[in-house]
Image: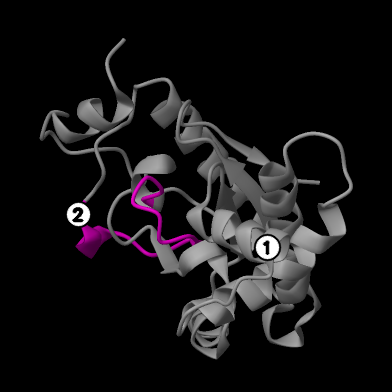
Amino acid sequence: MVSPRRTFLTAATAAGPAAPVADSPAAALDELLAGNARYAAGRPRRPLPAARRHPFAVIVGCVDAREPAELVFDQGLGDLLCTRTAGQVLDEAVLGSVQYGVQELGIRLVLVLGHERCGAVAATLEHVRTGAAVPGHLELLVDEIAPAARRTRVRPGNWAEHTMRAHTAWVRDVIRADPAFGSAGVEAARFDPGTGVVRLLP
């Protein structure tokens, strides 16, 4: 099977389809999930040049190199406004960037994207498990993710997976509750780098 990443990089250079029309949160989410289905199946379409695009979704994602949102959702440069921090941790810069997209650019969808085997989650679990000190600026990341780790510690199964899902949903809920983003739909999803598939979280 041809890797979706390799297919993307070796795609023909012919002009691609018109930019998606995403004039509602539901339409924007449908376009993202349809693009992810193409990506996961190894059949991405060629992105259009940035000059012909306008972002239709904000992606709040992780810095992990396996999670480039434009590839994951099979979108071109200029289609998505992406903010990335380790573990998709929120700070004022991230919130300000999301607000810019929603209020100034009129973007109708914010998607918080967590992923399997997140390094920031693993570091947080180690801290919660052992109580070891967290060096330098990493303390902010651990402090933000630790509540989700503690809430899910007693659940059976994969603690890291439970923590990632709980934290991603919490970030979504924080953004949803902020009146600065009231005009946009806000969703959360999980990306599996192994299969390339994105699934929405409840």
| Mark 1 vs mark 2, CA separation in Å | 49 Å
Q: Is residue 87 above or below residue 44?
A: below
Percent position of residue 73, x then y = 44, 42
- Tell me if residue 7 can be seen: yes
Give residue 70's mark: none
Q: Residue at x 27, y 57 (%)?
A: 77
Q: What residue is shown with label 2?
A: 49
* Secondary structure type for disc 1: helix
Left or right: 101 with respect to 42? right
Residue neighbourhood size for the residue with mark 1, other residues' Cα within 10 Å, grouped as few (<14), some (14–19), many (≥20): few
Percent position of residue 16, x then y = 24, 38
What's the residue type where badge 2 is placed? Answer: Pro
Which residue occupies the foreground of this view, 178 or 16?
A: 178
User: Most prominent secondary structure in the magenta stretch?
Assistant: loop
Q: Give the farthest residue toward the top.
A: 1
Q: Give the farthest residue toward the left.
A: 13
Left or right: 21 with respect to 67? right
Q: Residue at x 67, y 46 (%)?
A: 160
Q: What residue is shown with label 1?
A: 130
Q: Residue at x 78, y 69 (%)?
A: 147
Q: Is residue 194 above or below residue 23?
A: above
Left or right: 185 with respect to 53? right
**Snapshot quadrant of residue 200:** top right
